[in-house]
Image: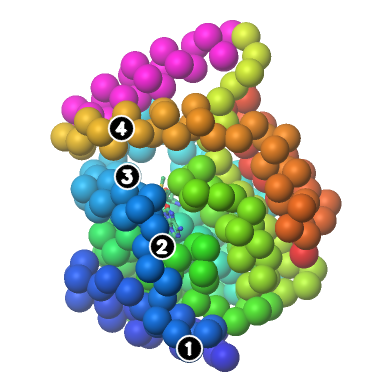
Amino acid sequence: MDAWDVCDLCIECCIKGDEIASIRSRREGQTRIEDSQQQQHIRSLFTRIARRYDHVNRVISLGQDQRWRRQAVALLDLPPDGILLDVATGTGDVALIAHERYPSAHIVGVDLTPAMVHQAARKTDRGAEQLRWALSDGLSLAFSDNTFDAVISAFMIRNVPDIAPAFAEQRRVVSPGGRVVCLEMTWPSRFPMSWLFPLYFFGWAALVGHLLSGDREAYQYLPRSVRQFLAPEAVVATMQSVGWREVTCSMRMGGTVAIYTGIK
Ligand SMILES: C[S@@+](CC[C@H](N)C(=O)[O-])C[C@H]1O[C@@H](n2cnc3c(N)ncnc32)[C@H](O)[C@@H]1O
């Protein structure tokens, strides 16, 4: 399959609006799997905050979020004309940073939530040949095996019900020797961050997120989802268990942000 087949369909969908409930799975020639309750919850939450998402991120991370995305993108090691998949692209920031860094690479950003992808599509003009946006579930990606040179996700993995199938699916669509990069928040275990972080996250981030987005529940979910997420050692072990090799984890911001990498 041509890697771009799915995108022509979905770019149309995204630009037309939010009414798209499903896309065809090109891989299996079947209609996409039914949403789980968690996926419905995630989609509803990100639909509500999509328009304010970037602005809130910049404020609650004190402008650091783009720096973490750049650091993650720098670890992709993409060939100049390589093909990159950004899973859970959201409003497209990782894909756009990757486009700056690898201007001749082909980049596909996919997400579960049409309203988020719609924001991504608004950031690029229709002529941006190297960048495509699509709707796809990260647990059942609409691409053939071995399609991409690398796959990246940022702040997605704590939102899926089980991370093993997500990492296995990412591995399936990457060519042998290709790379995975995963950027995610982590609950710090060491003093003083273990003491300061709850104040920052349950206090400042939840309050500012609520005030700027008007959505209290969404920005209560944010710290809760990080608090409940796995420790970095467990993420590394899961990546290894589904076949990623040479898995690494590097911590940033006093142990609150992790960047995982691996090779197929
Ligand atoms: C916190 S946002 C991160 C967006 C973007 N990667 C960024 O760096 O800002 C999480 C995104 O994950 C998406 N998401 C959650 N579960 C997903 C899944 N199973 N498949 C695809 N996208 C998913 C949500 O729709 C949302 O856009």
Secondary structure under badge 4?
A: helix
Ligand 1 within 8 Å of the CB at mark 2: yes
Relative to the observer, which residue lies in front, 102 or 113?
Answer: 113
Label 4 near label 3: C-beta < 8 Å?
no
Q: Can you say which quadrant of the picture contains the C terminus?
A: bottom right
Q: Earlier in the sequence, mark 1 or mark 3?
A: 1
The CA span between labels 2 and 3 is 16 Å
The CA span between labels 4 and 2 is 20 Å
In the picture, the disc for residue 219 is: 4
The residue stretch that appears in magenta = 192-212
Picture quadrant of residue 184:
top right
The amino acid type found where label 1 is placed reads: Gly
The amino acid type found where label 2 is placed reads: Asp
30 is higher (above) or lower (below) than 206: below
90 is higher (above) or lower (below) than 235: below
In the picture, the disc for residue 111 is: 2
Q: Earlier in the sequence, mark 4 or mark 2?
A: 2
The CA span between labels 2 and 1 is 19 Å
Secondary structure under badge 2?
A: strand
Relative to the observer, which residue lies in front, 32 or 26?
Answer: 32
The amino acid type found where label 3 is placed reads: Asp
Q: Residue at x 77, y 51 (%)?
A: 240
Q: Earlier in the sequence, mark 3 or mark 4?
A: 3
Please indicate, yes or no, whether residue 213 appears anywhere in the rendered image: yes
Q: Main secondary structure of the magenta part?
A: helix
Please indicate, yes or no, whether residue 253 appears anywhere in the rendered image: no
What residue is shown with label 1? 29
What residue is shown with label 3? 54
Q: Position of residue 171 (x, y in %)?
A: 68, 65
Label 3 near label 2: C-beta < 8 Å?
no
Q: Position of residue 50 (x, y in %)?
A: 26, 50
